[in-house]
Amino acid sequence: MKNSLKVERAKLNITQEELANRVGVTRQAINSIELGKYVPSTVLALKLSRVFGISVNEIFILEETD
């Protein structure tokens, strides 16, 4: 699964730490999601979409192999 977390974070000009604090996870969790090493829970994905003001589908994109 691809994601646009880093791009969306850049649009808001916030750090991984700031985003992590807003959604209640560690900076390392945000880093792992951005690198595609970790797939967030539904609740976390919804919290992220709320922070960015866009849908979950605009942040996370399924690939053919998913």
Image: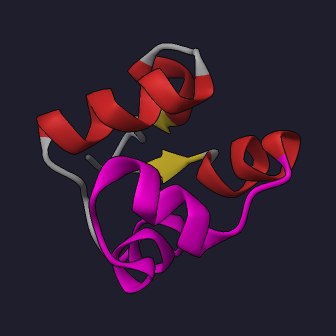
Is residue 16 placed above or below 13 in the rendered structure?
below
Q: Nearer the viewer, residue 32 or 1?
A: 32
Query: In the image, 22: left or right of 42?
Result: right
Q: Nearer the viewer, residue 66 or 21?
A: 21
Query: In the image, 13: left or right of 37?
Result: right
Question: Quick check: is 14 in the magenta stretch?
Answer: yes
Can you give x and y, in whole percent of width and height, for residue 14 in the image?
A: 75, 57
Is residue 53 placed above or below 42 in the rendered structure?
above
Query: In the image, 16: left or right of 64?
Result: right
Residue at position x 34%, y 75% in the image: 29
Is residue 26 placed above or below 65 in the rendered structure?
below
Residue at position x 35%, y 49% in the image: 23
Can you give x and y, in whole percent of width and height, for residue 35 in the image?
A: 52, 75
Is residue 57 placed above or below 12 in the rendered structure?
above
- What is the magenta range? 13-37
Can you give x and y, in whole percent of width and height, for residue 50 in the image?
A: 44, 22
Question: Quick check: is 18 in the magenta stretch?
Answer: yes
Residue at position x 44%, y 50% in the image: 22
Taken as a whole, is the magenta stretch helix, strand or loop? Answer: helix
